[in-house]
Amino acid sequence: MHDPADPSSLRPAKRDLVSIDDFSNQEILELFKLAHEMGRDLRAWSHLCGGFILASLFYEASTRTRLSFESAMGRLGGRVISAADMSSSSASKGESLADTVRVVGGSYADVIILRHPCEGAAKVAAEYAAVPVVNAGDGSHEHPTQTLCDLYSLWVEKGSLEGLTVVLVGDLRYSRTVHSFAYALARFRANLVFVPHPGLELPSYVLERLGRRQAYEPQHVTLRDFPDVSRDADVVYCTPQKPHQLSLFTEVTELDVPSYDALYVTRPQIERFVRDGGRAPERYLRIEPHTMAGKKFKATSLMHPLPRTGEIAYEMDKDPRSIYFAQAARGVHVRMALISVLLGRSSFKSPPPERVADGDEVVGSPLSCANPTCISSKEAHLGSRFRIDSRRPFRVRCAFCETERPVGFVGDRERRTAWRSGAPEAADVRAEEMVLFESDEQVQRAAFAN
Ligand code: NCD
């Protein structure tokens, strides 16, 4: 409703890009057409965003993402304010992310680009900032604008995004680019082949989300097409339809696809597994000319979000199938298009995505997220928020970082009673009345009967 005393009530609702699922497929394709047009003459758009300011808040290292956003804003005629090293900002004095973005998204800037080491940080920023927030990477969770660049490159190279067969290799656990890319590819009905470095398998919440939203079913398979890479890997194959020849998780079947459209390679995210107490992996994969010599790789685009740290031999750079530098260059085109849309200077004709029914939310329980790098673990004022994935068996995941969280007891606020999470009564508690507990002790402390 328009309030004449408040001119901002005339503004259309802000759009954030926290997850790749925030844009519909049609919107993504419209964005690519605009990016393509912009890419034809990068200097022709400097009238578009004059008078607007972009803030880049980078709590983690970045070269391409930050510079390409800043370059994109410059090419659109806007200005950039940048906190590229948050150790010199008030975050180092203990300011919360919520407070920082409330201030920056006030009179300082019209759009915020945020990179943060905590999973769920961009969601929090989007909830607190008055201006659009773009997730430029939140911990090991998502990186939707890298996905837009990756998909755009495939769209340019292949002419279409429907039904591609894409292999994702390397550190699938901590690579946020892989997670967002897989969600997007699945929406375009791709066949996905996950080839993790042993121990760095895709998190279960990613596979679950592919299943929940796209009806993808994972199958464990063996793969002989590039043995150097897949040797000890637990290869998982996900397709839109249930393939009758493969049976779910029971039997290891050899994967046989006619060809691969793309091979997406990621570096080991050493900074993240060292933080989690792990060690740098030994014998990490390396793509050499002989890796892609087979017939099935004839038209395979070799992709990498960069930076590379040895996973792709330099000899591959001259190979016409290698598109990683083009991928990075196109990032400016895509980000120009994105900024102009978020600032309302270009608009989509297609409708936004339909909201997915993604489980009821349970807010403010004593149970907290067990992921130490979840934003809710770092910033206590956020409290806990969980989504109910299933009631029988009872399963929840953190609404910030999506990590599954075991629950000890489920309480009913009205009846002040709690039951073990496996009990039939627990499954029937209404989400608005629900309180989640880790232990008997927490139940006692809250003075619930059990
Ligand atoms: C990626 C990232 O930051 O997640 N880099 C990027 O944005 N191009 C990939 C990486 O760091 O490995």
Image: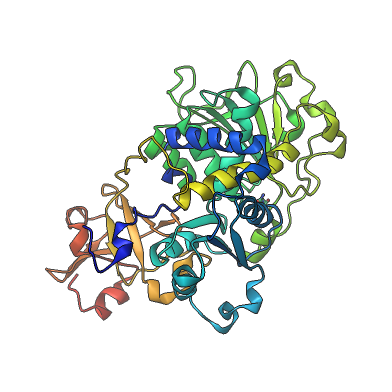
- Visible residue check, residue 96: yes
Classify residue 195 as left or right of residue 24.
right
Direction left: furthest residue: 415
At x 47%, y 74%, the residue is 103
Direction right: furthest residue: 315
What percent of the width, then of the height, locates residue 420? 26, 61
- Visible residue check, residue 170: no
Classify residue 262 as left or right of residue 391.
right
At x 37%, y 39%, the residue is 212
Q: Quadrant of the N terminus?
A: bottom left
What percent of the width, then of the height, locates residue 67? 68, 56
Residue 57 sits in quarter: bottom right
Classify residue 225 as left or right of residue 183.
right
Between residue 346 and residue 278, name the one nearer to us. Answer: 346
- Above or below, comparing residue 102 to residue 303 in the picture: below
Classify residue 417 as left or right of residue 139.
left
What percent of the width, then of the height, locates residue 365? 30, 69
What is the count of numbered marks? 0
- Above or below, comparing residue 290 to residue 391 in the picture: above
Between residue 357 and residue 48, name the one nearer to us. Answer: 48
What percent of the width, then of the height, locates residue 223? 65, 26
Q: Quadrant of the C terminus?
A: bottom left
Residue 38 sits in quarter: top right
Direction front: furthest residue: 47
Q: State how the image is colored.
A: rainbow
